Amino acid sequence: MQQKNRVILIHGLHQTAWIMRPLAKRLQAAGFDTYQYGYRSMRDSIKTNSARLHNWLEKHHHLDQPIDLVGHSLGGLIIRDFVAEYPQWQIGRCVTLGTPHLGSVCADYIWRLSPAVVGRSYIDALDGTVAPLPEHITLGVIAGNRPYGLGQLFLQHHNRKLRRADNMPSAEHLLHDGTVYVKETKIEAATDHIVLPVSHTGMLVDKTVASQTKYFLQHGQFDHSELKHL
């Protein structure tokens, strides 16, 4: 049996490495070697956290061994920065979960009201200005459309603004996971993109999210046949 790559799991804003544990356990059950990378999402910038991931890998991993990367929310943007800034690493496949690749409307509102709540994660990341995805990176994107979470107050307000500006906004433009719009997760350079009935934080403990993540890491695409049964 072919040796699976080590999978580095990267949490999101206001979280710690432990929140990725349920997903890590499910990947481990499938034979993956996982590591939950922790970083200071509020205090440090995306560039600092990307550099620290690079430094950690230099100490604990060999350059000639490919790695897979899975990131939730802001963690997906750290992946974007990392693969652009440190091309010496062999990257197998990447999966992002609820990551606002195009910037975050919710973060924009919070940044204007109280910048300290998003800290240094806004600039060069949540503002939508993260580095472009290199062409050789195989990226799978999972979005959620269950609007549960603290961010839904901002997004409900924003949806009302959209409806006033456009009497018939498309349903897709209004869908979100309670923190991130589905449309914000879409990046043209992605290899595959799916939407699952999960919330922004709930996706981290969802079995289907785990199985789709596993499938993408194994095959480079999502299992669309499974989606027909949801």
Image (spheres, helix red, strand yellow):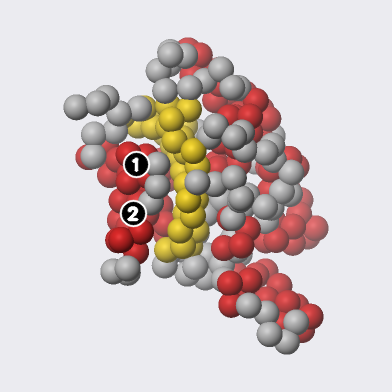
Q: How many marks?
A: 2
Residue at 59% over, 22% down: 87
Does residue 23 appear in this view?
A: no
- Quadrant of the rendering where the N terminus is positioned: top left
Q: Nearer the viewer, residue 22 or 170?
A: 170
Task: Work out which residue is located at the far left of the displayed protein and give it.
Answer: 1
Q: Residue 85's x, y, as percent? A: 65, 25
- Above or below residue 45? Residue 224 is below
Residue 118: horizontal and vertical position, in percent? 68, 49
**Residue 219 marker:** 1
Is 164 above or below relative to 4? below
Q: Please identify the quarter of the rendering in which residue 173 is found.
A: bottom right
Location of the C terminus by quadrant is: bottom left
- Find numbered disc 2 in the image and state the secondary structure of the residue it sits on: loop
Residue topped by disc 2 = 223
Q: Which residue ends up furthest to the bottom in the rendered image?
A: 167
- The residue type indicated by label 1 comes to His
Pointer 1 with pointer 2, Cβ within 8 A: yes
Give the left or right position of residue 144, taking residue 218 as reference. right
Label 2, residues with CA under 10 Å away: few <14, some 14-19, many ≥20: some
Rendered view: 132 above or below 226? above
Residue for point 59% across, 77% down: 171
At numbered mark 1, what does the secondary structure look like: helix, strand or loop? helix
| Measured Cα–Cα span from mark 1 to mark 2 | 9 Å
Query: Which residue is rendered at x = 30% and y = 56% of the image?
Result: 207
Q: Residues within 10 Å of mark 1 (few under 14, many from 20)?
A: few
